[in-house]
Amino acid sequence: MNKVPESLDMDALRSFVAGIDAGSFALAAQHLCRSASAVSAQLKKLEQQCGTALVMKKGRHVQLTRSGEQLMSYARRLLSLNDETLRAVKGEALQGEIRIGMQEDFGEALMPAILGAFNRQHPEVMLTARVDRNLPLLTALARHELDLALLWQAEQQAGTQLIGQCPLAWIQHPAFDLAGYLQRGEPLPLVAFDAPCVMRSRAIEALDKAGIP
């Protein structure tokens, strides 16, 4: 008699993914409205099912083991398919049209994969994407020609609502002697787009306020 294959626990997989995304299973427990002990028990059950450790502690955070990294790629797909199946069976498939605008930077590198995944989960939704500069996209939002837009430093305009924002951050090569440049007062070399560019303007403005040439 053939042995029945063991099935992975979907709730345990959800807790596993949430814990890694949050960087802490205690935080994941809050997001999932569960107790920390319940989430820990689910992780232990998942490790028993897989026969290997999936995470390890690194300071205050957790990181994936090699087996955990392998499981994570499957876990996201399993959860996505599970959620899609339930929506379809329950008749909760989304329908309608979403008009989204974005800067060229996002349109080329970031959004194709995101919109592709969304389209596979919600095939009944018509997606319309527009790639343009900040001002035309903001104007289109105000005129209700777009439903949402992903922009660099969106200036708030009448008829638009801010959903969320991420701060700009400075990055440098590890070997770059930033402290030496600052101590000597030498002009700081920058890598930036030609003007007009919002990030270029913001960077120069910040340096001017700090008195850094």
Image (cartoon, grey):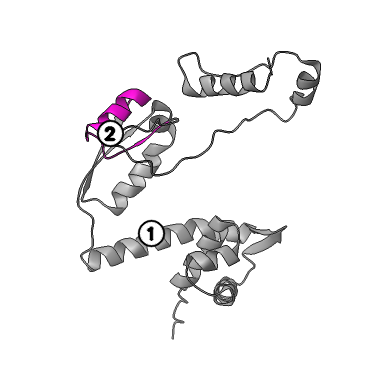
For residue 211, which quarter of the picture?
Answer: top right
Task: Identify which amino acid the numbered label 2 is placed on.
Answer: Leu
How dense is the environment of label 2, judged by Cα within 10 Å: few (below 14), some, or many (20 and up)?
A: many
Residue at image position (38%, 41%) is 162
Q: Which residue is under mark 2?
A: 141
**Amino acid, disc 1:** Ser
Q: Looking at the image, which is closer to me, 9 or 156? A: 156
The image position of residue 121, as x and y in percent, is 31, 53
State left or right for residue 107 relative to residue 169.
left
> Which corner quadrant of the image does residue 5 belong to?
bottom left
Question: Who's the residue at 50% across and 71% down the image?
Answer: 12
Above or below — where is 205 with respect to 90? above
User: What's the residue at 37%, 26% (across, down)?
Assistant: 134
Badge 1: residue crowd in 10 Å (few <14, some 14–19, many ≥20): few
Q: Which residue is mark 1?
A: 80
Picture coordinates of residue 192, whole percent (x, y): 55, 19
Quadrant containing the N terminus is bottom left
Q: Is residue 8 visible?
A: no
| Count of numbered circles in the view | 2
**Disc ID at residue 159:** none
Toward the bottom, the furthest residue is 1
Q: Residue at x 46, y 71 (%)?
A: 11
Tell me where the magenta segment starts and ends, as one range.
132-151
Question: Height in image: 42 above or below 140?
Answer: below
Of residues 208 and 128, the one drawn nearer to the viewer in this rendering: 208
In x, y percent, where is residue 144? 22, 35
Q: Is residue 195 visible?
A: yes
- Element carrying mark 1: helix
Query: Which mark sits nearer the N-terminus, 1 or 2?
Result: 1
Q: Is residue 134 magenta?
A: yes
